[in-house]
Amino acid sequence: MELSFKNGLFDLVVCKAFIQHLPRKGSDKTALREFYGVLKPGGCLLLLTNSSQGIGKGAKSVDEKYRMYSPDEVRDKVLEAG
């Protein structure tokens, strides 16, 4: 939950299918703040995660312990992180 890089080091941070697996409540927000911290001003975050969209009406995720995000939830979390 703590990246061991100095702040403002990277132009790009890639997070591929990771944040939905973090176990603690709020840990996705903590991870996004860490990503923001290591990005240079104007840097980019490429975030790929699962979606609650398109899994079928009333369908459940394959594994209930993983979070499912709507596009609005992801946007709000990223904006909140910075």
Image (cartoon, grey):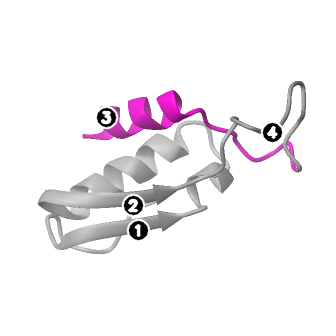
Q: Secondary structure at mark 3?
A: helix
Instruction: Identify the residue under disc 3.
Output: 79
* Crowd around label 1: few <14 · some 14–19 · many ≥20 (10 Å): few
Q: Earlier in the sequence, mark 2 or mark 1?
A: 1
Q: CA distance from mark 3 to mark 2?
A: 14 Å
Instruction: Identify the residue under disc 4.
Output: 55
> What amino acid is labelled 3 in the image?
Leu
Give the image quarter of residue 60.
top right
In front of the other: 36 or 58: 58
Q: Earlier in the sequence, mark 1 or mark 4?
A: 1
> What amino acid is labelled 1 in the image?
Val
Q: Which residues are magenta?
A: 63-82
Contact between marks 1 and 3 (CB within 8 A): the answer is: no
**What residue sits 51% from the left and 45% below the top?**
28
Q: Quadrant of the C terminus?
A: top left
Disc number lying in front (3 or 4): 4
Say left or right for 67 vs 45: right
Instruction: Identify the residue under disc 2.
Output: 46
* Crowd around label 2: few <14 · some 14–19 · many ≥20 (10 Å): few
> What amino acid is labelled 4 in the image?
Ile
In front of the other: 30 or 11: 11
> What amino acid is labelled 2 in the image?
Leu
Q: CA distance from mark 1 to mark 4?
A: 25 Å
Point out residue 45 in the picture as x, y percentages from the top left corner: 33, 58
Q: Secondary structure at mark 4?
A: loop
Q: Earlier in the sequence, mark 1 or mark 3?
A: 1
Instruction: Identify the residue under disc 1.
Output: 14
Disc number lying in front (1 or 4): 4
Give the image quarter of residue 42.
bottom left
